[in-house]
Image (cartoon, grey):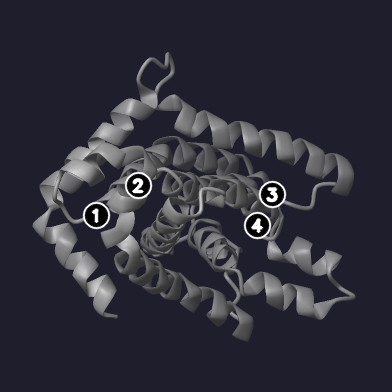
Amino acid sequence: MLAPMNLFRTIHERRELLWNLAARELKQRYRGSVLGFLWTVLTPLFMAVIYLFFLRLLAGRGVPMEEIIIGVFAWQFTVQCANAGTTCVLGSANLVKKVAFPLEILPLSQVLANAIGHLLSLLVQFPVLAFLLWRADSHFAAAWPLFFFWVAWQTMFNLGITALVGAANVYFRDTQHVVGLVLSAWFFMSPVMYNMDFASRLAGQWPWAADLLYANPLTVIINGYRAALLPGAHAGFPPAAWVGLLLAPATLIVGTVVYRRFQNSFADML
């Protein structure tokens, strides 16, 4: 636990530098773009609409639109952090070689920038969900404040991934390609475009498949989002789900330990 505690101390001591780097990342991301921040919202919305169409074409009206929207926005947050991890060190080579500062700031600033984008996307996601629920003569669940607990839990998980990928890509430049392949497979192994009821029906003959799905940290997080916002939705916590829940802090610990272990050699490898 020493590495994460040092990480929290670094956040406090270098909070101004962290904020400046995150702000720089956000400015660079939308520089020269006509729609700017709107792409953060439009991309997951387009994904939700497209996949909803094909799911209903192939499997009928089995997955509500609200659950798909929540799943896609959550997935997009993790994908952005994982992809940012591939460049968080390599893309700041000049800083790493010439400026003395805690290098943990690099993955932290990427995750902070993406977390800000994720929170801003709620300004669109929540009204869309409210409209869909209103059309179904419903409303947000009373447990909606728990949504922000799951945001914090996912941010912790994303930080571990970003740090781990960032360190790995300095030593193994093929990491960025591996990340793309892993994300493609991970998408279908996470309940982004479906819910657990849908998955359980498909995996009726293989009960172990549902346990494997629950052991996925993103499954627990997405189910938590849905249970917090949607009346009638439930997170579900079989034993395998506790594995997925605890893998989030475990990923943070492993990611920060690996990153701190190899960061002293970053300048030599760049």
Name the residue: 24% across, 52% down: 105
Image position of 49 (left or right of 72): right
Q: Is label 2 in contact with label 1 (beta carbons under 8 Å)?
A: yes
N-term mark: 2 or 4: 2
Q: Examine the image and state in which quarter residue 233 appears.
A: bottom right
- Count of numbered badges drawn on the protein: 4
Which amino acid type is marked by label 4?
Answer: Trp
The numbered dot on residue 89 is 2
Residue 33: give x, y in percent of width and height.
42, 17
N-term mark: 1 or 4: 1
Most distant residue in the front direction? 268
**Can I make out residue 164 in this image?**
yes
Give the class, few, some or many, for how many residues have Cα within 10 Å of label 4's Cα (few <14, many ≥20). Answer: some
Image position of 185 with respect to 259: above or below: above
At mark 1, the secondary structure is loop
Q: Examine the image and state in which quarter residue 51 appears.
A: top right
The residue under label 3 is 64
Q: Report the Cα–Cα distance between label 2 and label 1.
A: 8 Å
Which amino acid type is marked by label 2?
Answer: Val
The numbered dot on residue 186 is 4
Which amino acid type is marked by label 3?
Answer: Pro
